[in-house]
């Protein structure tokens, strides 16, 4: 178990040049990042051999990061906290859809097309499926490799190549070299062969064993041998056991710096019952799953799982927010009404959607509110008559429209007088408190603008 070092202890081993080439302003700042597991010693171009020897293990993130894809932009691991509210989770649970090499050609083509085309637009973020799992159920190594090549070519997603046949894995890994995929599973019996395949073809390796004791021995052995691009797969018999083992491994990695379990996990869901597979996937999302492989593509299931994952992996200290500016709702012109709300994404998309559903073409002003909701922003002084008036002047709203009426959320009716003072010549209209009432409000107040 690697001993935790403080930032000051780490700084003593750094060059103290404050060169900033590591991305930090000082060596002390970089040392603090190393101590918190938010940087790697490799970022320092002038680290001495002594520093590398002493800090190598101590400066690694508690959960090893692994990058997938041609651009290495799909990541798992690198976590630094056990609970989301402590700070934030770093890399979200990756979703993969499983394809068996024994599936019909028609079903395979259908799944590949669905994965490649799937995209969910939620509160301004485009969500997609990150990986495809290719599982060998047959015995034809060439067919397995051909399927891997087809999947990579058609969907351009990094793969999870899963087979007990080392020759089949070698063939498949070779044809998708450059995809930075994941192969395995490596066991105590075949680990040496699979490590060489992973190294040669630049892929990460799945490591598994019947129990935790054997697993930690195997991961430690592989790491000591010089290969550390690993993902672990626990062999569990129930959802409760999977929950427990995931939690034990994460706690050991984060709280005790236990490197042998400091890896992202992989879970193949084999139960095709929609409810059961959803419950298992939810457990992975909320309790430390690195990669969750779903047994089939189901669009309805994915919507719920994607939304949950987005919520869990949103930084609790930094709400999802939209860019502060004037948004066109529908096809507004200079005579269209003007509305205003905060830049919290959920608030913006709900309000914009309700205005659009009402049939009204309008301008929606979104000032900078640091991603806060209406009442929170008002209480923090970020959504007041003064701040809204200032923002409207900065964006030149008077030059964009002929109207001199602006609708504010009903929850902040008290700012109407202050806003009129800061926007001379404008009349403030107090809108609804709830977005669900916008349609009836529009029909009552803006019926002349409706077509």
Image: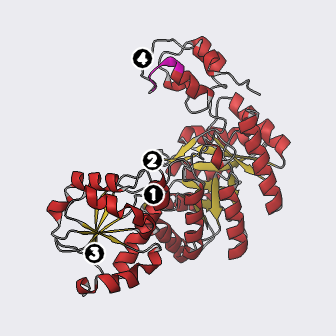
Which quadrant of the structure image shows residue 415? bottom left
Marks 4 and 2 sit apart, C-alpha to C-alpha, by 31 Å
Front label number (3 vs 2):
3
Q: Earlier in the sequence, mark 3 or mark 2?
A: 2
Residue corresponding to mark 3? 330
Image quadrant in which you'd find residue 345: bottom left
Label 4 and label 3: CA atoms lie apart by 51 Å
Is residue 160 or residue 367 the one in the foreground? 367
The residue at 46%/25% (across/down) is 24
The residue to which callout 4 is attached is: 19
176 sits left or right of 226 in the view: left
Q: Which residues are magenta?
A: 24-28
Q: Residues within 10 Å of mark 1 (few under 14, many from 20)?
A: some
Front of the two marks 4 and 1 = 4
**Residue bearing the label numbered 2:** 70
Q: Residue at x 79, y 62 (%)?
A: 239
Image quarter in which the C terminus is found: bottom left
Label located before the other in sequence (4 or 2):
4
The answer to whether residue 310 is seen in the rendering is: yes
Q: Is residue 334 left or right of residue 379?
A: left
Q: Earlier in the sequence, mark 3 or mark 1?
A: 1
Comes first in the chain, label 4 or label 3: 4
**Cα distance in 3D space between marks 3 and 1:** 35 Å
Label 2 sits on a secondary structure element that is loop
Element on which disc 4 rests: loop
Foreground label between 4 and 2: 4
Q: Which residue is mark 1?
A: 156
Q: Identify whether 104 is placed above or below 151.
A: below
């Amino acid at each position: 178990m690697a001993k935790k070092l403080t930032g000051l202890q780490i700084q003593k081993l750094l060059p103290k040049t404050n060169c900033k080439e590591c991305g930090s302003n000082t060596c002390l700042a970089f040392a603090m990042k190393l101590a918190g597991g938010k940087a790697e010693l490799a970022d320092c171009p002038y680290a001495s051999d002594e520093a590398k020897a002493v800090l190598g293990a101590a400066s690694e993130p508690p959960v090893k990061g692994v990058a997938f894809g041609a651009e290495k932009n799909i990541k798992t691991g690198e976590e630094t906290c056990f609970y989301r509210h402590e700070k934030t989770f770093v890399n979200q649970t990756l979703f993969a859809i499983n394809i068996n090499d024994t599936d019909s050609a028609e079903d395979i083509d259908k799944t590949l097309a669905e994965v490649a085309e799937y995209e969910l637009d939620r509160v301004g973020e485009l969500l997609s499926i990150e990986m495809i799992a290719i599982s060998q159920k047959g015995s034809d190594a060439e067919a397995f490799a051909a399927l891997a090549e087809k999947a990579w070519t058609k969907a351009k997603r990094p793969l999870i190549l899963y087979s007990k046949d080392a020759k089949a894995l070698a063939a498949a890994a070779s044809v998708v070299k450059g995809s930075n995929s994941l192969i395995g599973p490596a066991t105590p019996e075949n680990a040496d062969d699979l490590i060489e395949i992973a190294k040669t073809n630049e892929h990460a390796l799945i490591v598994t064993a019947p129990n935790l004791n054997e697993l930690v021995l195997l991961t430690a052995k592989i790491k000591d041998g010089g290969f550390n691009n690993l993902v672990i797969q626990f062999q569990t018999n129930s959802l409760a056991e999977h929950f427990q083992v995931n939690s034990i491994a994460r706690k050991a990695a984060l709280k005790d710096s236990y490197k042998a379990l400091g890896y992202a996990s992989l879970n193949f869901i084999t139960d095709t019952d929609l409810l059961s597979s959803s419950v298992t996937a939810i457990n992975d999302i909320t309790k430390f799953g690195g990669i969750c492989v779903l047994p089939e593509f189901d669009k309805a299931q994915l919507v719920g799982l994607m939304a949950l994952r987005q919520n869990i992996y949103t930084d609790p200290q930094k709400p999802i927010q939209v860019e502060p500016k004037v948004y066109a709702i529908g096809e507004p012109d200079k005579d269209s009404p003007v509305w205003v709300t905060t830049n919290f994404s959920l608030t913006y998309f709900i309000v914009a959607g309700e205005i659009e559903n009402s049939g009204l073409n309008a301008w929606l002003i979104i000032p900078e509110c640091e991603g806060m909701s209406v009442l929170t922003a008002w209480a923090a002084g970020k959504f007041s008559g003064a701040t809204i008036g200032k923002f409207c002047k900065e964006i030149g709203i008077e030059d964009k429209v002929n109207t001199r009426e602006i609708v504010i959320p009903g929850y902040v009716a008290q700012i109407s007088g202050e806003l009129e003072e800061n926007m001379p010549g404008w009349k403030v209209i107090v809108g609804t408190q709830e977005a669900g009432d916008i349609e009836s409000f529009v029909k009552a107040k803006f019926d002349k603008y409706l077509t």
